[in-house]
Image (cartoon, rainbow, N blue to C red):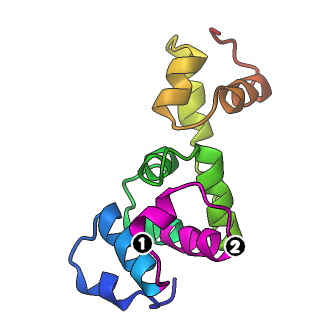
Amino acid sequence: MDNTYKALDDLLAPSVEDIIRVVAESNRLSSADLIYRSRKPYIVDARDDAIAEAWVRLRDWSLTDIGIAFGNRSYAAVKKSLLRRDIDVSGIIDRAAVIADAKTGLTTAELSFKHHCSRPSVRKILYEAKVSFKA
């Protein structure tokens, strides 16, 4: 990421609220503009910037956590925002961990919750690995 949002660099450990506020102010918007469901191109662009900043700066946050902070957006919506910013999101799901957890008897619902991905993604991973699973 570039240093467009210098105010974030001055904070020791920015929170997601700090990131949203700084990006919104830099784009002459309110924090609420980035959280609400507006599809105006200039708001979507600023929201994508904020999501990318959150992903880079909050490394212990999952895509699901970031989506919740940005108005209950889905994992897929956050991933799409990151892709629009050319941030590599391949391999975010640890396939080996999903397979190992499935072998312990967790259901697809439990696996999707634990690994922050959708149930169809879990089923696809397990199907490709030829691992039996509980629906």
The residue range painted magenta reads: 27-50
Task: Describe residue 3's horizontal placement relative to residue 94 as left or right.
Answer: left
Q: Are marks 2 and 1 in contact (CB under 8 Å)?
A: no
Q: Compared to 70, does 115 lie above or below?
A: above
Residue kind at label 2, given as amino acid type: Pro
Vertical placement of residue 29 versus 68, above or below? below
Mark before the other along the chain sequence, 2 or 1: 1
Q: Please name the residue shown 50% across and 20% down the image.
A: 110
**Spatial separation of the CA atoms under disc 2 and disc 1:** 15 Å
Q: Quadrant of the C terminus?
A: top right
Q: Amino acid at mark 1?
A: Ser
Which label belongs to residue 100? Answer: none
In this figure, what is the number of numbered marks?
Answer: 2
Q: Which residue corresponds to mark 1?
A: 30
Residue at 47%, 54% in the rendered image:
70
Whether the magenta-drawn stretch holds residue 126 is answered as no
Q: Main secondary structure of the magenta part?
A: helix
Name the residue carrying label 2. Answer: 41
> What residue is rendered at 35% in x and 62% in y?
16
Where residue 33 appears, as percent x and y from the top left, is 49, 66
In the image, what residue occupies the spot 45% across and 46% down? 68
Q: Is residue 49 left or right of residue 54?
A: right
